[in-house]
Image (tube, helix red, strand yellow):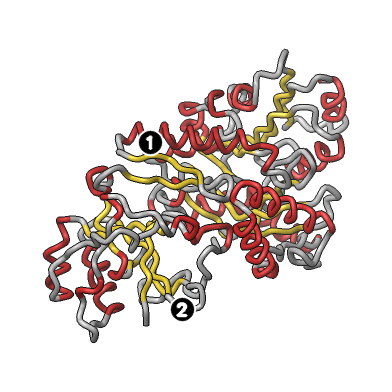
């Protein structure tokens, strides 16, 4: 049965969205809040979830497929539990024990004030795959999760919150992905993640599907889009562990360190995880857990310090989203980047995005988005790797400025006029800093084929082994 889309389903959907918008308004002002509400309404059809429970026949097919797999590693599902609602806890446990892939163990570290309650529930299942650990005290999410990790026997470890739910085929799809990656790359991935949605407290309705992009190391520096479901090679995870100083964003800190360690990431474009919406969860109450986003900013600051990049972390208007602003020359820090480009917006009708980041065929990815809107899960305002960049709002590494001249017939130069480049729609009056100036597109001839030139330059940079960085904080207005 298909579930109703966002704003057309349960009352909790509407209440949750209203709370988010009110919190947004309190942080960023009335007009920004109104914009947030308008955008939420415009995206309501995309906010639903198309997830449906598989039929008994489909489940039987999945079990047969699971039994026939050539690779069947043990997966350890680890759950730090604390004062968990009994109904939610049972649903979580049963979602693991009824997996169509059965080579698993469920490791639970219980720091509840009343430990006997959850222990008694687990005894009713009489399943030898359950490993229960009673913790003497609650030392926080990282320490409690590490207690689980110490007992892990599996080759891979799956992270699961104590009130969330896995889909019946979650671990089966993970193993299928591992096998496919091994055939293609000759190795198994180190980190696997999937799409997700949210499940209401009743456990009956699904909403807010999060269709995630394939792994993008630059996007991860803006937001932890990876979490739920996350499966990590146990050997790697036991080396990294979770750090208590980043409690609330301990998984984000772990993923950033995995990235630095050169981990191979893989994405499964399928809903395998249901994130619980309840009054106490971050899923419904982002404002109540702002400490988690501060912890995320701290983890990101640690990451760029370890990378020795000259940059600062700034929180974007939407909590949980960040921006790196590079000090001075971006290319002095990001030697892996050949060009960075921002948004090209129209000057008429309050402005809309007309170009910037493009696909390999020259189609703008966020075309038509009104200024002030942030896009699906706010990704239009996130720095990210780009297939191609529009040269009307671009900074080019010195290494490729001769290529720029060869392609455009124009010497590379940058804007020096204050106000042409802006960092956000609500900062239009701010003059650009030295490292934020972009190519002066007014130097191009009127008949220049902008798209063709942009694609050729982008292709040369990619073929040379350099990356292209979309930097939406840079913005130029183009009057057609």
Quarter holding residue 39: bottom right
Q: Position of residue 211 (x, y in %)?
A: 59, 60
Q: At 46% across and 26% down in the image, what residue appears?
A: 239
Q: Position of residue 313 (x, y in %)?
A: 43, 40
In the foreground, 470 or 325: 325
Q: At 57% across and 43% down in the image, what residue appears?
A: 230
Q: Secondary structure at mark 2?
A: loop
Horizontally, is 191 left or right of 407 in the view?
right
Q: At 73% across and 59% down in the image, what residue appears?
A: 207
- Can you tell which of label 1 and label 2 is closer to the viewer? 2
In the foreground, 1 or 430: 430
Residue 448 can be seen, yes or no: yes
Q: Is residue 247 above or below residue 217?
A: above
Identify the residue position indicated by label 2 in the image: 348
Q: At 62% across and 23% down in the image, what residue appears?
A: 151
Horizontally, is 326 left or right of 289 in the view?
left
Hey, which residue is sitting farthest bottom in the picture? Answer: 447
In the foreground, 416 or 240: 416
**Mark 1–mark 2 distance (CA, rounded to whole Å):** 47 Å
Q: Position of residue 172 (x, y in %)?
A: 63, 51
**Crowd around label 2: few <14 · some 14–19 · many ≥20 (10 Å):** few
Q: Is residue 384 above or below residue 348?
A: above
Identify the residue position indicated by label 1 in the image: 261
């Amino acid at each position: 049965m298909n579930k109703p889309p966002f704003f057309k389903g349960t009352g909790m959907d509407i209440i949750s969205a209203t709370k988010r918008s009110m919190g947004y308004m309190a942080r960023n002002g009335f007009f920004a809040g109104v914009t947030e509400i308008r955008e939420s309404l415009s995206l309501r059809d995309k906010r639903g979830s198309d997830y449906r429970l598989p039929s008994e026949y489909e489940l039987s097919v999945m079990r047969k497929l699971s039994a026939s797999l050539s690779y069947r590693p043990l997966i350890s599902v680890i759950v730090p539990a604390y004062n968990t609602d009994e109904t939610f806890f049972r649903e979580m446990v049963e979602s693991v024990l009824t997996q169509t892939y059965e080579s698993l163990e469920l490791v639970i570290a219980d720091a509840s004030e009343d430990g006997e309650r959850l222990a008694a529930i687990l005894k009713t299942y009489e399943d030898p795959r359950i490993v229960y650990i009673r913790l003497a005290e609650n030392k926080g999410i990282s320490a409690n999760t590490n207690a689980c990790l110490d007992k892990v026997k599996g080759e891979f470890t799956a992270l699961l919150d104590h009130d969330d739910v896995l889909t019946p085929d979650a671990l089966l799809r993970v193993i299928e992905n591992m096998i496919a990656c091994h055939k293609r790359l000759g190795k198994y991935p180190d980190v696997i993640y999937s799409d997700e949605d949210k499940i209401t407290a009743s456990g009956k309705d699904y909403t807010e599907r999060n269709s995630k992009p394939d792994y993008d190391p630059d996007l991860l520096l803006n937001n932890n889009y990876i979490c739920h479901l996350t499966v990590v090679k146990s050997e790697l995870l036991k080396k990294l562990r979770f750090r208590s100083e980043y409690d609330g964003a301990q998984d984000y800190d772990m993923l950033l360190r995995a990235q630095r360690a050169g981990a191979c990431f893989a994405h499964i474009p399928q809903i395998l995880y249901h994130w619980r919406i309840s009054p106490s969860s971050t899923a419904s109450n982002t404002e109540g857990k702002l400490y988690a986003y501060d912890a995320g900013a701290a983890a990101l600051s640690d990451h760029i310090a370890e990378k020795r990049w000259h940059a600062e972390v700034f929180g974007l208007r939407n909590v949980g989203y960040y921006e790196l602003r590079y000090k001075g020359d971006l290319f002095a820090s990001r030697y892996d980047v050949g060009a960075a480009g921002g948004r090209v917006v129209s000057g008429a009708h309050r402005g809309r995005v007309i170009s910037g980041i493009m696909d390999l065929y020259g189609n703008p990815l966020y075309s038509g988005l009104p200024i002030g809107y942030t896009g699906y899960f706010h990704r239009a305002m996130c720095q990210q790797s780009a297939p191609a960049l529009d040269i009307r709002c671009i900074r080019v590494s010195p290494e490729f400025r001769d290529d720029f001249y060869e392609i455009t017939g124009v010497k590379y130069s940058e804007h020096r006029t204050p106000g042409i480049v802006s960092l956000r729609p609500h900062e239009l009056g701010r003059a650009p800093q030295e490292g934020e100036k972009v190519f002066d597109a007014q130097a191009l001839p009127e008949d220049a084929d902008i798209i063709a030139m942009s694609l050729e330059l982008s292709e040369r940079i990619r073929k040379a082994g350099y990356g292209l960085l979309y930097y939406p904080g840079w913005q130029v207005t183009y009057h057609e």
